Image: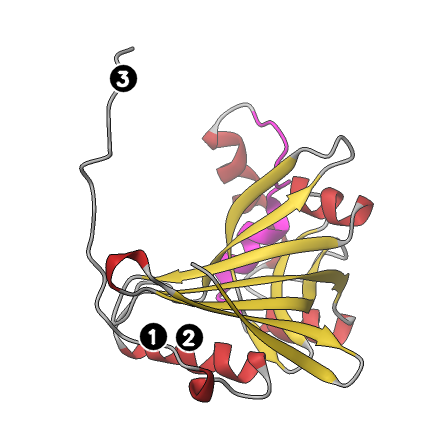
Amino acid sequence: MSTHQFDGLRTEYADSPLRRCDLLDDPMVLLQRWLEAAANAGWCEPNAMALATCDAKSQPHCRMVLCKQIDSAGIVFFSNARSDKGQELKGSPHAAATFWWATPRERQIRIEGAVCPTSDEISDAYFANRPRAAQLASAASEQSRVIRDRRELEERVAALAAATSGGPVPRPAHWHGYQITPQRVEFWQGRKARLHDRFRYERVATGWHIERLAP
């Protein structure tokens, strides 16, 4: 395989500053505002984030998931506890997540913190509000397990659909929410000539300590 160089791929970012006075006391509120701005700009799945976990051999793993809830306590996503990510979080309950939006302004948010399952009430409420097709898929799929072919997956979904006869699909006990309680949150704003603005929130006993970082 020949080497393909990508050094010529370069985008000059707009000069939209992020100043200390633009920050808020609660980084989760600022995250909400940035996400809403991306959604209003028509960004495809603006709540998508790269989630990094680590297995028992200290091998990191990363994949895209959807953030479904944000409040002052942290951010929430939902998954199968028997999946690779679920098992990794069981053994090492810490994670890092990154949001990236290229428009309307080049922005990135990094979050690091401890992870714990949400309550059954939160998991039940979210699962109940999902489209039926998504409920069936989540309940029928043994996420991350090897399957024979796609037909096997479709047969499992069809069997569950028939068993529930168009009624409610019970939430599997192993499918639930996970909350990342942030310890560090970094806001990154693209600037010209790669002189980006970066601010890091660090959780301390009295709240949040904010520092500017070099790009």
- Residue 3 bears which disc, if any? 3
Position in image of residue 165 (x %, y %):
58, 59
Residue flagged by tag 1: what amino acid is it? Ala
Q: Secondary structure at mark 1?
A: helix
Q: Quadrant of the N terminus?
A: top left
Q: Is disc 3 surrounded by few (<14), some (14 to 19) or many (20+) residues within 10 Å?
A: few
Q: Secondary structure at mark 2?
A: helix
Residue flagged by tag 3: what amino acid is it? Thr
Q: Is residue 10 magenta?
A: no
119, 179: nearer the viewer = 179
Q: Which residues are magenta?
A: 130-147
151, 106: nearer the viewer = 106
Colour theme:
secondary structure
Identity of the residue drawn at 78% across and 35% down: 56
- Residue 39 bears which disc, if any? 1
Instruction: Report the label total.
Output: 3
- Residue 35 bears which disc, if any? 2
Q: In the rendered image, is residue 162 in sight?
A: no
Position in image of residue 22 (x %, y %):
43, 86
Q: CA distance from mark 1 to mark 3?
A: 37 Å
Q: Secondary structure at mark 3?
A: loop
Quarter occupied by residue 176:
bottom right
Residue flagged by tag 2: what amino acid is it? Leu
Q: Is residue 200 left or right of residue 19?
A: right
Query: Which of pointers 1 and 3 lies earlier in the amino acid sequence?
Result: 3
Query: Which of pointers 2 and 3 lies earlier in the amino acid sequence?
Result: 3
Identity of the residue drawn at 74% across and 61% down: 114
